[in-house]
Amino acid sequence: MIEFKQTKKDNYRFLLKSQTGKTLLRSIPFPSKDSMESSLKALKNKGINFKLFERRTNTDGKFLVELKNTGGEIIGLSGLYSSEAGMENGILNIKNSLESGLELTLKVH
């Protein structure tokens, strides 16, 4: 499920949530609704391949993922994972959820 929000600073962001309601990915703030929708549509049109996911480790040894657009710009960040296997499973969940969620009509709540 993709949830869209307008922030207090008139930015827009999306949250990708699992079926249980857990946030899988939080987008960066976008300056407009159109730029947010364009980024999501570009992912849908060009496909979401595993090369768009950059795997990272934070200073505490936790794993996280950055989702980048085809131009290499970060558009979203995952939560933290305690293991590399958990992170890889998270990437698969994010990819599958984005692909199914992008079929929905984009609208901001």
Image (spheres, rainbow, N blue to C red):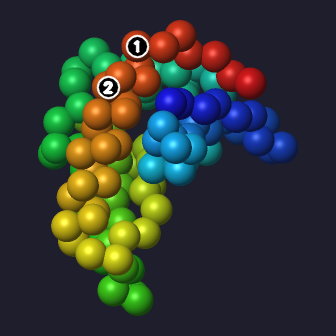
Helix, strand or loop under label 2: helix
Quadrant location of the C terminus in the rendered image: top right
| Residue at image location 32% in from the left, 25% down from the top | 99
Is 82 or 65 nearer to us in this picture? Answer: 82
> Residue at point 37% right, 70% down?
81
Vertically, is 18 above or below 38?
A: below
The label on residue 99 is 2
Residue 78 lies in quadrant: bottom left
Q: In this view, does 54 lie to the left or right of 58?
A: left
Q: Is residue 81 visible?
A: yes
Q: Mark 1 points at which residue?
A: 103
Mark 2 and mark 1 residues within 8 Å of each other at the beta carbon: yes
The residue positioned 48% from the left and 14% from the top of the image is 104
Q: What residue type is labelled 2?
A: Glu
Vertical position of residue 30 compared to residue 36: above or below:
below
- Dot 1 amino acid type: Glu
In the rendered view, would you say 65 is above or below 48?
below
Residue lying at 31% horizontally and 54% vertically, measured from the top left: 90
Image: 10 above or below 27:
above
| Residue projecting furthest to the bottom | 60
